[in-house]
Amino acid sequence: MIRVALFGALGKMGREIAEVAAQSEEIEIVKVIDKNADYIGQNYSAVTGIGGYDMVLSDDTGNGLFADIDCAVEFSEHAATAKHVEAACAYGIPYVIGTTGFSDEELNVIYKTADNMPVFVSSNMSKGINVINILLEQMVKNFRGYDIEIWEMHHRDKRDAPSGTAMMLAETIRNVSTEDMNIVLGRKGVDSKRKYNEISVNSIRGGDIFGEHHIMFAGIGENIEIVHRATNRKVFALGALEAVKFIVDKHKGLYTFKDILKV
Ligand SMILES: NC(=O)c1ccc[n+]([C@@H]2O[C@H](COP(=O)([O-])OP(=O)(O)OC[C@H]3O[C@@H](n4cnc5c(N)ncnc54)[C@H](O)[C@@H]3O)[C@@H](O)[C@H]2O)c1
């Protein structure tokens, strides 16, 4: 069994991962970590109602967070994640990061740890979005001169905007474009006509939407739209556990879903 420490264990994604891992024959969650003071020291199964976890929730301050585990998985909050990944570096623990909303500085910290340990980062753990991310490279090459608009929708509690996924898609497009493209967040004002070299990204928030991403290439006489809808959170949890299985025996380095998919 692959022994995993789960950071953000009380969150929406943490609970989903715990549910899915409880059914796994290859992955066992052996530590559950969160920062919610109301529940630290309590039994995880009792707090969450998820069966099979006869262990107490701990916070991230104790020693030994990274002892006796094979891999860490984190879906929590950006600053905390960067701090945890940096701490894990001394132990060379393979780390799967699903958290989004990192500053450039935090991302640099995380990327640097990949010099010493395997680090898997994906702002979207669904196979669908990651296949789309690869398809975009073909689309950009074939739809030169088309206007590219991205918009995303998420539940009302999502903290960061735009989503990490929307930014990943926009950056993929920018990186494969031969022109110098600017990623433009939002659009407003009396003088806001789109420029030809813009990749526009907009965010919509409401209700319980799990995550929806639209990418449109609009040309003269046609427009092409790719849509991805996550219909539940399980898809992200399954992807995160697939990432654990992939990364656990890898050497140091930075990995993404592209390393798992057939390109
Ligand atoms: N990569 C993906 O596929 C994917 C999918 C969904 C969400 N996300 C991202 O994952 C993150 C979590 O999402 P969520 O919907 O579960 O959020 P959430 O707010 O429901 O849960 C976050 C949890 O992290 C905990 N936390 C905060 N600081 C902590 C710390 N220092 N140590 C341990 N735990 C800490 C919080 O107490 C909370 O329980 C967000 O950044 C979100 O954007 C990524």
Image (cartoon, rainbow, N blue to C red):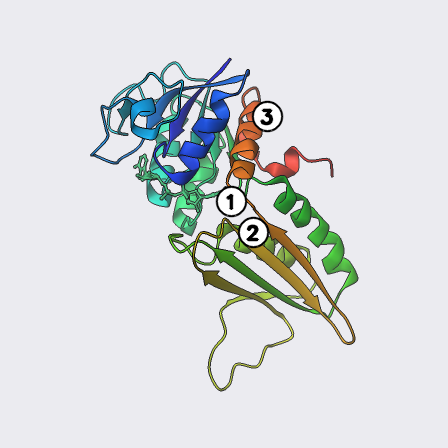
Residue 210 is situated, as x and y percent measured from the top left of the image, at: 50, 48
Q: Is residue 251 visible?
A: no
Q: Are marks 2 and 1 in contact (CB under 8 Å)?
A: yes
Residue ID for mark 2: 168
Per the image, label 2 sits on a secondary structure element best described as helix
The numbered mark, 2 or 1, whose residue comes first in the sequence reads 1
Q: Which mark is residue 246?
A: 3
Per the image, label 3 sits on a secondary structure element best described as helix
- Residue at x 57%, y 34% (from the top left corner): 255
Q: Residues within 10 Å of mark 2 (few under 14, many from 20)?
A: some
Q: Which mark is residue 193?
A: none
- On screen, residue 208 above or below 29: below
Judge left or right: residue 30 versus residue 58: right
Which amino acid, mark 2? Met
- Residue at x 44%, y 23% (from the top left corner): 93
Which amino acid, mark 1? Ser
- On screen, residue 77 above or below 144: above
Residue ID for mark 1: 123
Q: Which one is nearer the viewer's eye here, 243 or 104?
A: 243
Q: CA distance from mark 3 to mark 2?
A: 21 Å
Q: Which one is nearer the viewer's eye here, 133 or 36?
A: 36
Judge left or right: residue 156 versus residue 21: left
